[in-house]
């Protein structure tokens, strides 16, 4: 258990509760200096766990290094941090998550991403002789021009425009639904989950 | 040991099956109800979670429910698994068959929009010459609607509209918002009525068979419910030609079982009911079984527009425009029938419609908050013989039951109607000081509305219809089908109130027939 989670579980015990009052005082553990939470003998403990992303790094596996660098750049431009309380796509781990999710998706969706990221790198090379990830904000903005076009029902035919349209929403959703963005927001990304039916 | 023979076997526990049980048991009829799904403990099966706790962070497992647009990663387990109970269709003719299998059926999750059909639907052929009339009219069904509406606690505003008959409402007297008054002013100039949404309030969390119909049926002591009973087919007495029960498969053990009854009422949902009849090879002397499949065309976010005027708030910002076209001669437009517009003027647009990203997008979203109009367009689909379901002999589900094959597509009439709807709503928005952000006239694939209707239609002529006007098989007098499959035309209105009224009416007729020993 991470330290923060442990303290959270301590805080969950109501101060001065009848339950605590009935317990004999337990001696402090001299090695830790923290008293374990008092609990009735037949009460099952509630252990606070964390998701894997709270304790470990994701291992990108789907995109090539060049594609992933471009995805990181486009994520940062589309969903930058907006103040200390609103982490951007990079801090939220959106590129790493999308690497996993697109890698698990159907061939059509994978193609949209790969062709789009390759296209962005090719355009950056052609226009600025750089990888897309090395462009400055103005240069990157030039290549994101399709996102400033009015929405149409038909998917754009151009691979970069098509990718950007999908990525704009995916990056945004991945950020808003992330653990990092949800911290401190009571209802962010919350839903009523259905377990499998018996 | 020989099992009990029940008076009536009811297949399905949703709106139609639930209403049959509610009606019959209170008159002392011993009923057995089979449902393919479990009885759900809603406190145990649902839990609040954060999206990041789910494997795909709320995006959903790729490819899990390809036909269920409504599914999210949170609620994916509430829908029927397409691998467990598949169906087939031509790749160029997609059909989104959205199913729920649990006690209460889809009535646990419906959008609660509660409308009556009018004689523009019941007597549609008289009005414009297309298709068939229903064998009943609004006056005949009105007393049943009037008993259903208080059970479901329907709220709405009485307007005296011929195309959308009023019901027994909890009257909605809330004032309109300023932007709605502006919008209504423009609608009035064009003779377009705007009314309040008509919606079932229900009780507590649900407006469902589960909490409004089945508990009272259980209290009579006359209802036995068997969950997890997947009906394979109906069985026929060789001597009498009557239905004498149903074969079913236990969902967990796959054990084959048979239930006996004097009468069978099928309310398994439109297409599951038809599937059972097709697999039973009964009730199809007309050749109409499976045909005339229709639903309603749905376009969500057909027009997204931003209110440019200051203010806008101060009251109810959502409204409902019932059909207003083709009411005089039936063919005033270049299409027949009509559509409804379910709209709101005080939303926030989906970021995908805003041509910006980053900080600029965030600013636009903040500026547009509570200022965005959006509309769901719901259009009538013509009931055509060519749109049908049949049994796919090459594919069975997890219970070894042959599955449905779909052949269904929208036509020219639907396309013209939707274009008209999009343009009309945009015109109303534009003249009410809204600026269009995005628009389109492309519907979701057939089935999306979860309003599948027809395939077992009623009628006076046994050569053209499967059921008579009492939802009773023309061919087999002790077989009733009481769900949406009995519809002749569906109109633009959400069908649940009509399904409930039909089931109540059919069940009372069945009672009378049983009392008179005609069945």
Image (tube, coloured by chain):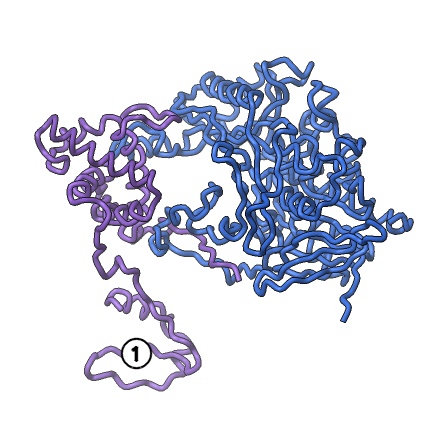
Chain colours: A purple, B blue
Residue found at the very far left of the displayed protein? A129
Residue found at the very far front of the displayed protein? B394
The image position of residue B142, as x and y in percent, is: 76, 35
Residue found at the very far right of the displayed protein? B516
Front residue of B354 and B264:
B264
Q: Quadrant of residue A81?
A: top left
Name the element at disc 1.
loop
- Left or right: A157 as drawn, with respect to B319: left
Q: How many marks?
A: 1
The subunit letter for the residue under badge 1 reads A
Front residue of B211 and B318:
B211
Front residue of A150 and B347:
A150
Front residue of A183 and B136:
B136
The image position of residue B290, as x and y in percent, is: 66, 37
Alpha-carbon neighbours of circle 1 within 10 Å: few (<14), some, or many (≥20)?
Answer: few
Residue hosting label 1: A36
Q: Is residue B183 visible?
A: no
Query: In what quadrant of the picture does the N terminus of chain B appear?
Result: bottom right
Q: Is residue A3 visible?
A: yes
- Left or right: B307 as drawn, with respect to B97: left
- Classify B110 as above or below B22: above
- Classify B5 as above or below B449: below
- Classify B49 as above or below A111: below
> Going 70% across and 32% down the picture, which residue do you hit?
B488
> Going 76% across and 38% down the picture, which residue do you hit?
B285
- Classify B332 as above or below B387: above
The image position of residue B55, as x and y in percent, is: 35, 54
Q: Quadrant of residue B136?
A: top right
The image position of residue B248, as x and y in percent, is: 66, 58
């Amino acid at each position: 258990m991470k330290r923060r989670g442990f303290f959270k579980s301590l805080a969950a015990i109501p101060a001065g509760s009848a339950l605590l009052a009935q317990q004999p005082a337990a001696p402090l553990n001299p090695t830790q200096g923290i008293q374990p939470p008092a609990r009735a003998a037949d009460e099952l403990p509630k252990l606070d766990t964390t998701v894997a992303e709270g304790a470990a790094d994701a291992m990108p596996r789907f995109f090539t290094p060049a594609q992933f660098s471009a995805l990181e750049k486009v994520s940062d431009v589309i969903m930058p941090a907006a103040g200390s309380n609103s982490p951007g796509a990079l801090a939220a781990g959106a590129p790493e998550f999308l690497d996993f999710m697109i890698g698990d998706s159907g061939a059509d969706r994978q193609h949209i991403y790969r062709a789009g990221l390759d296209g962005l790198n090719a355009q950056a090379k052609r226009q600025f002789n750089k990888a897309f990830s090395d462009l400055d904000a103005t240069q990157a903005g030039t290549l994101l021009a399709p996102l400033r076009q009015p929405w149409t029902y038909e998917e754009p035919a151009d691979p970069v425009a098509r990718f950007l349209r999908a990525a704009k929403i995916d990056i945004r959703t991945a950020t808003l639904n992330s653990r990092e963005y949800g911290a401190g927001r009571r209802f962010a990304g919350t839903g009523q989950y259905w377990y499998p039916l018996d | 040991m020989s099992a009990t023979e029940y008076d009536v076997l009811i297949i399905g526990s949703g709106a139609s099956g639930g209403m049959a049980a509610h009606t019959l048991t209170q008159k002392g009829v011993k009923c057995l109800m089979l449902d393919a799904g479990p009885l759900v403990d809603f406190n145990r099966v649902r839990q609040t979670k954060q999206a990041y706790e789910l494997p795909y962070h709320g995006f959903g497992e790729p490819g899990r429910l390809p036909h269920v647009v409504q599914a999210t990663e949170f609620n994916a387990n509430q829908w029927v698994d397409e691998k467990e109970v598949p169906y087939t269709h031509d790749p160029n003719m997609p059909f989104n068959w959205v199913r729920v299998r649990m006690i209460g059926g889809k009535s646990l999750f419906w959008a609660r929009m509660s409308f009556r059909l009018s004689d523009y639907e019941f007597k549609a052929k008289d009005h414009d010459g297309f298709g068939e009339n229903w064998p009943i009219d609004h006056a005949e069904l009105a007393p049943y609607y009037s008993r259903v509406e208080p059970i479901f606690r329907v709220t709405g505003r009485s307007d005296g509209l011929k195309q959308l008959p009023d019901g027994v409402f909890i009257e909605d007297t809330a004032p309109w918002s300023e932007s709605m008054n502006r919008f209504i002013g423009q609608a009035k100039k064009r003779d377009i009525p705007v009314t309040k949404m008509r919606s079932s309030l229900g009780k507590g969390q649900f407006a469902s068979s589960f909490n409004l119909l089945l508990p009272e049926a259980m209290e009579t002591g006359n209802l036995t419910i068997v969950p997890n009973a997947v009906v394979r087919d109906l069985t026929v007495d060789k001597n009498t030609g009557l239905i004498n029960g149903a074969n079913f498969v236990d969902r967990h053990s796959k054990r084959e079982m048979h239930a006996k009854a004097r009468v069978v009422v099928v309310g398994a949902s439109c297409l599951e009911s038809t599937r059972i009849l097709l697999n039973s090879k009964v009730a199809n002397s007309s050749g109409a079984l499976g045909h005339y499949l229709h639903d309603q065309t749905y376009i969500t976010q057909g027009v997204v527009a931003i209110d440019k005027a200051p203010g806008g708030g101060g009251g109810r910002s959502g409204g409902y425009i019932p059909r207003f076209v083709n009411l005089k001669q039936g063919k005033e437009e270049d299409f027949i029938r009509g559509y409804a517009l379910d709209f709101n003027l005080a939303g926030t647009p989906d970021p995908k419609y805003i041509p910006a990203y980053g900080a600029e997008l965030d600013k636009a979203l903040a500026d547009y908050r509570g200022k965005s109009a959006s509309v769901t367009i719901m259009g009538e689909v013509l009931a055509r013989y060519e749109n049908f379901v049949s049994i796919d002999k090459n594919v069975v589900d997890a219970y070894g039951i042959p599955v449905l094959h779909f052949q269904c597509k929208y036509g020219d009439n639907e396309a013209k109607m939707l274009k008209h709807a999009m343009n009309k709503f945009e015109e109303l928005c534009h003249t009410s000081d809204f600026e269009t952000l995005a628009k389109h006239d492309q519907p979701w694939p057939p089935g999306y509305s979860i309003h599948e209707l027809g395939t077992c239609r009623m009628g006076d002529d046994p050569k053209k219809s499967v059921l008579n006007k009492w939802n009773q098989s023309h061919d087999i007098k002790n077989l009733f089908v009481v769900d949406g499959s009995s519809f002749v035309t569906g109109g633009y209105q959400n069908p649940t109130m009509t399904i409930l009224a039909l089931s109540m009416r059919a069940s009372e007729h069945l009672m009378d027939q049983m009392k008179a020993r005609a069945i």
